[in-house]
Amino acid sequence: MRTALRGLTTRGRSFLAAGVTAALCAFAFGQAALFQVGVLLAALPLAAAGMLVRTRYRVASGRRLSPHRAAAGQEARVHLRLDNVSRVPTGLLLLEDKVPYVLGPRPRFVLDRVEPRGFREVSYRVRSDLRGRYPLGPLQLRLSDPFGMCELTRAFSAADVLTVVPQVQDLPAVRLPGESGGQGDSNTHTLALAGDDDVIPREYRQGDDLRRVHWRSTARYGELMVRREEQPLQARATVLLDTRETAHRGSGPASSFEWAVSCAASVAVDLVQRGYRTRLLTDTGFAVPATGAGGGGTTAAESVGLLLDALAVVEHSDGGTLARAEEVLRLGGEGLLVAVVGELDEEQAERLARLRRRTGGAVVLLLDTGTWAGLRHGLPDGAGERAAARVTRLRESGWTVLPVRAGDSLPALWRTADRTQNTTVPYRDEVGA
């Protein structure tokens, strides 16, 4: 009953106070009729609280997200289901789901009555322009009497998580540096070094080339056996994301850092869909293991999900160099390397140039972060020349350099990375524009 009294609403407390006041005035002035009115006013909220305390509703809830993983700026719908598992109908129910402020206001619903063994379904929409993992729930249920005198709040324990991932753009199909026939730079085969005794044959199937018949196995098993088809090794790729806070400009969704994260997500998804075993690496040395269709028993969709989940929570780092990423690439940096980097000084540009020696192909998207801060005319003297010199150094070391400015289209930039083209991407120095 103490819990019920704490749940009295403003209306219930007002009725109770009015009833007590009327009863006191009746004693003071000797008015029996006024005392009866006071008793009635005070009894109404107390009776409502007693009814709620004695109520034995048994309800269950469920939550479903559609989609479970949403892109930044994309709406997601949350479906709620409330089941009345008791044998009596419910009264007035007020539902409120707890959501972070960044996803919008807290949704509230009113359910008038749920029949025994019945259920009700409601839904609401959430949207966020910021990446991250946002908890949804727990669902709060408020019981109320028909007169609105008392409300009791109960909360379920179950909660879900909505993952808001970076925006992913569709990239055009291009032939990247170091790529050979669409299989990357190492287009070797699993049986290339196998001897005649190491071949695992299989039975002959209609349409097999007779030149692939393995006669020794045919004589052993008494039926035609052919050599197994050579399987190409899956090409590998690494997407390097520069998260150094000192290397980026701007804030919020329009910052150079958010553009770099979205670019890394788009490139990683494109490489996975093209059959690469793709690894995500940051300047801190944090790496998401190489995944891809068929790699480690994962499908392309699962691999994309792992990469996007990691990029959804990536944050600025307080480091100033790319040394840790260089150490990781030294241990296993074969294959294609795509780097998305911010502002580079001379030392970091030299480190990046050395990384090219350990890769089959290398593409760098070099962000002109000054354009994100609106510094077209305010760069220090000689800054444009130094930036152009770093671009030249990277190209001389074998990198395909794609300079990026605020407002550039990623698909258009990616198209210029095609190694079959004979054009050279110029460095655009517009300091004096």
Image: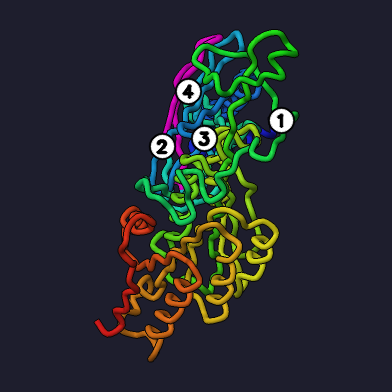
**Residue range of the region highlighted in magenta in the rendering:** 103-125
Residue 27, relative to residue 169: is it above or below?
A: above
Label 1 vs label 4: CA separation? 86 Å
Mark yes or no: residue 400 visible: yes
Q: Nearer the viewer, residue 189 or 155?
A: 189
Between label 3 and label 4, give the one nearer the viewer.
Answer: 3
- Pointer 2 local density, CA inside 10 Å: few below 14, some 14–19, many at least 20: some
Between label 1 and label 3, give the one nearer the viewer.
Answer: 1
The percent position of residue 12, horizontal first and vertical second, equals 52, 34
**Residue indicated by mark 4:** 146
Q: Identify the amino acid type marked 3.
A: Ala
Quadrant of the image for the N terminus? top right
Q: Identify the amino acid type marked 4.
A: Pro
SS for dot 2: strand
Proximity of marks 1 and 3: CB atoms separated by less than 8 Å: no
Label 2 vs label 1: CA separation? 63 Å
The percent position of residue 331, horizontal first and vertical second, equals 70, 59
**Residue indicated by mark 3:** 301
Residue 350, relative to residue 207: is it above or below?
A: below
Q: Which color mode does the image show?
A: rainbow
**Residue indicated by mark 2:** 125
- Pointer 4 local density, CA inside 10 Å: few below 14, some 14–19, many at least 20: few
SS for dot 4: loop
Give the mark, 2 or 3, whose residue is nearer the N terminus: 2
**Residue indicated by mark 1:** 196
SS for dot 1: helix
Label 2 vs label 3: CA separation? 25 Å
Q: Nearer the viewer, residue 1 or 44?
A: 1
